[in-house]
Amino acid sequence: MMEDVWLRLTGLGIGIGTFLTIGLFHPVVIKAEYYWGTRCWWLFLLLGLGGVAASVCVENLFWSSLLGVFAFSSFWSIKEIFEQEERVRKGWFPKNPRRKYKF
């Protein structure tokens, strides 16, 4: 009986953690593109690979799941950083006046 409660709370915790992780990556991608442009995509790749490795190594289901969410949010951010550059080009987000753009 008690294990059912903990299992249900674990699912709720994973859901909340997923929501917060995705929400955290949105401003990180915007700031990363603003300061470094698309050349920082490899940082997201390294974060993703590290998250995958950690997720496989951790035995706890809760933390393994959140590390997997972190890893694939990092991978998704690679795509988003290039799309963010396009949004800046369209004028939807401000350009960094200290950077040179290729457009």
Image (tube, rainbow, N blue to C red):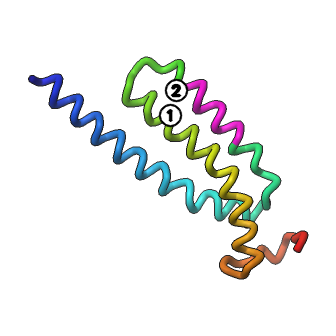
Percent across and percent down for residue 83 are 70, 63
Dots 1, 2 in contact, CB < 8 A: yes
Give the amino acid at mark 2.
Answer: Ser
Q: Identify the mark at residue 55; answer none if there is no mark.
A: 2
What range is drawn magenta here? Answer: 45-55
Please tell me whether residue 50 belongs to the stretch shown in magenta: yes
Image side of residue 26 versus residue 97, left or right: left
**What residue is pinned by disc 1?**
67
Residue at disc 2, secondary structure: helix
Rendered image quadrant of residue 47: top right
Q: Residue at x 57, y 41 (%)?
A: 72
Q: Residue at x 71, y 78 (%)?
A: 94
Q: Residue at x 69, y 50 (%)?
A: 78
Looking at the image, the residue that sits furthest to the bottom is 91
Percent across and percent down for residue 62 are 37, 30
Asked if one can make out residue 50 in the rendered structure from this viewpoint, the answer is yes
Give the amino acid at mark 1.
Answer: Leu
Position of residue 52 relative to residue 33, above or below, is above
The front one of 10 and 90 is 90
Percent across and percent down for residue 89 are 77, 76
Rendered image quadrant of residue 101: bottom right
Q: Could you tell me how far apart the alpha carbons at marks 1 and 2 are, in whole angstroms?
A: 5 Å
Q: Name which of mark 1 and mark 2 comes first in the sequence.
A: 2
